[in-house]
Image: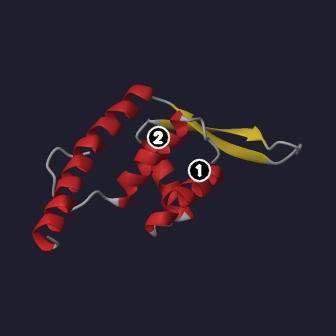
Amino acid sequence: MAKSVSTFMLRQRAFLKLYLIKLVEEERLYGLEILETLKGEFKAYGYKPTHSEIYKSLHELMADGILDRYRRPKEGTKLQEVVYYRFNDLEEAKRYKKQLKVELDRCVGLLQKALKDNYR
């Protein structure tokens, strides 16, 4: 994540990566389970992450060396496999979350200012 901030708000992919790291910390490692969990978490806010955005974010976390994936047989089947995710570099995951906290605080400040200035 760049030190210089040039975007107005946090990008969707960065937001999803933060939650993907959280879910891997909670050992929710199966891709489809991650997607359904996030859809449920954000339903009240009108946000429905897409399958492709989740997997693009997972792939970026893998490319950054933060996550790794592995295959395991699906429960109750002999030939079907499921892809699970785990940390490849836990310290890098913590560093990413710390950087995102700074960015989230900035975004919250922008939103609070807009509410204060426009909706007294």
Q: Give me the residue at 27% from left, 49% from top.
A: 104
Residue 31 percent coordinates (x, y): 62, 50
Residue 25 percent coordinates (x, y): 51, 34
Give above or below for 95 relative to 108: above
Residue at the far front: name it.
Answer: 120
**Which quadrant holds residue 99?**
top left
Give above or below for 49 relative to 72: below
Q: Give me the residue at 16% from left, 44% from top.
A: 3
Image quarter (top left, top right, bottom left or bottom right) of the N terminus? top left
Spatial separation of the CA atoms under disc 2 and disc 1: 11 Å
Q: Is residue 33 left or right of residue 100?
A: right
Q: Is residue 62 visible?
A: no
Residue at the far left: name it.
Answer: 117
The tag on residue 42 is: none
Label 1, on which residue? 34
Disc 2 residue type? Ile
Residue 116 percent coordinates (x, y): 14, 65
Q: Is residue 20 left or right of residue 108?
A: right
Q: Give me the residue at 16% from left, 58% from top.
A: 6
Element carrying mark 2: helix
Label 2, on which residue? 21
Crowding at dot 1, Cα within 10 Å, few <14 / some 14-19 / many 20+, comes out as some
Disc 1 residue type? Ile
Q: Is residue 102 visible?
A: yes
In the image shown, does 69 or 114 lie closer to the viewer?
Answer: 114
Q: Is residue 77 left or right of residue 59?
A: right
Crowding at dot 2, Cα within 10 Å, few <14 / some 14-19 / many 20+, comes out as many
